[in-house]
Image: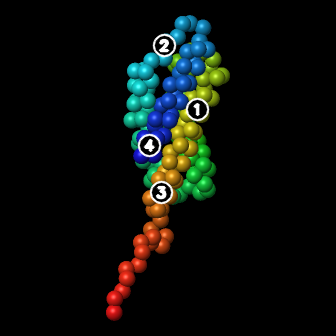
Amino acid sequence: MAGLIGGVTVGIGARLAMRVVALTDDTPGTLLTAGGTLGIVIVLLMSSLPLAVVYVAIERFLRGSDLRKGLTYGAAILVFPGALFLGGGGEITEIGVPALNLPMFASLFVLYGVVVARAVGWLERRRGGSDPAAPSQEPEAATTR
């Protein structure tokens, strides 16, 4: 569920960033269509789900609040695999304003980490926590004599 929330959020953010790139480019850009937006959101959603699974697996080793955990994880995925995406050059450095494009798209990796961490934290609190050492919230059974 956290991966779904993070993927949709970043997919919409990526689409908005792409629109900014198109608007800052000297050549005529593309149109913003519902089909194109849906396609981008679906692709980012599917490709980001494994990152959410990784976060859930390592989250107990991260310290601090959900926000701090998310910033830490977002920075880590910015380094890898984000560096592969951002460091490859291509359209990010050839269209629009590269000094704007790079930080705009880099921030999406950090945003993803924060959204997933906050969603995982919220879901765990809503479920009652996942700490096996925490006391049970189940009422005690009544004893009869």
| Mark 1–mark 2 CB contact (< 8 Å) | no
Residue 28 location (% of width, % of height): 54, 7
Mark 1 or 2 closer to N-term? 2
Q: Is residue 68 above or below residue 105?
A: below
Residue found 52% across the figure and 19% down from its top: 90
The first of marks 1 and 3 along the sequence is 1
The residue where tag 2 is placed is 31
Q: Is residue 104 visible?
A: yes
Q: Residue at coordinates 59% horizontally, 34% vertically from top-left?
A: 107
Which residue corresponds to mark 4? 3
Mark 1 is on which residue type? Ala
Q: Amino acid at mark 2?
A: Leu
Please identify, in this view, whether the residue under mark 1 or under mark 3 is nearer the observer: 3
Mark 3: few, some, or many residues within 10 Å (few <14, many ≥20)?
few
User: Relative to the observer, which residue lies in front, 125 or 45?
Assistant: 125
| Numbered circle sitting on residue 126 | 3
Which dot, 2 or 4, sits closer to the camera? 2
Image location (x, y in percent) of residue 134: 49, 70
**Mark closer to the chain start, 2 or 3:** 2
Q: Amino acid at mark 4?
A: Gly
Residue bearing the label numbered 1? 106
Distance between the alpha carbons at the discs numbered 2 and 4: 28 Å
